[in-house]
Amino acid sequence: MKYFALILLSIGFLAGCSSSTAPPSYEENKKMLIDALQTEDGKKAIRTLLDDPQFKELLVIDHEQVKKSVEETMLSKEAEEFWKEVYQDPKFSETMAKSMVKQQEELMKALMKDPTYLQDLESFFASAEMKKELGKVLQSSDMRKEMQKVVEEAIQNPLLQTKWQKLVEEAGSQKEGGGKSKEESGSSEEKKEEADK
């Protein structure tokens, strides 16, 4: 009986030891890894790994592969539908326009210095169709209202009012000067007629 109890005790002890050596579960591994990474030693190990040139090379993705993936994604029909829907949102359109203002300004400045672009622009506006369209636009009632509004704003502008006043005064003084010269010429002609008599 003693031997039997000793054997049972040994078996129980061995079973306890074998269960404690079982591999930890996924959750336990995850918890241990997160705990280890949050320690100073873990953070130091990550910094060392990121500074390693060989590891950096592994992080670099092939440029051609990225380019091809982007082209395939952006030029797909699904992407086209997606961008159409996105650009219908006024807030998104406004944000995109604001973010691209600087690039658009630089592009326009570069284009205005490009002689071939300017030549193309001139030929475009000089074409008969474009002249016809511009004529329609300029003669439209909406355009006339806008032009009238611009002229009214220009006249009411305080900076321009002094210029308008000077121009009116100059025009008035020239008119008066012209009138005097006529009177003087008329009186001189009368004097000549009297002298001839």
Image (cartoon, rainbow, N blue to C red):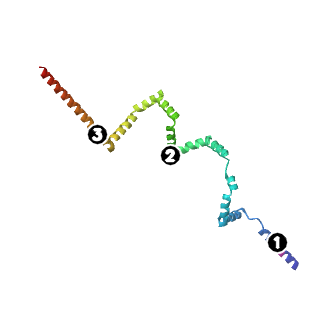
Q: Amino acid at mark 2?
A: Lys
Say which of marks 3 and 2 sits in front: 3
Q: Amino acid at mark 3?
A: Lys
Q: Is residue 25 visible?
A: yes
**Mark 2, residue position:** 102
- Does the segment drawn in magenta span residue 167? no
Indicate which disc, 1 or 3, sits on the residue closer to the N terminus. Answer: 1
> On the rendered image, what quadrant is the C terminus found in?
top left
For the record, the magenta segment spans 9-13
Percent across and percent down for residue 147 are 37, 36
Q: Are marks 2 and 1 in contact (CB under 8 Å)?
A: no
Indicate which disc, 3 or 2, sits on the residue closer to the N terminus. Answer: 2
Between 144 and 127, the one lying in front of the other is: 127
Q: Quadrant of residue 23?
A: bottom right
Q: Amino acid at mark 1?
A: Leu
State the CA–CA distance, disc 1 to disc 3: 113 Å
Q: Residues within 10 Å of mark 3 (few under 14, many from 20)?
A: few
**Mark 3, residue position:** 166
Q: Residue at x 51, y 38 (%)?
A: 111
Q: Is residue 62 left or right of residue 165?
A: right
Kindly state the secondary structure of the residue where label 1 is placed: helix
**Mark 1, residue position:** 14
Indicate which disc, 2 or 1, sits on the residue closer to the N terminus. Answer: 1
Establish if 168 lies above or below 36.
above
- Looking at this view, name the residue that lies furthest to the top: 197
Percent across and percent down for residue 75 are 61, 41
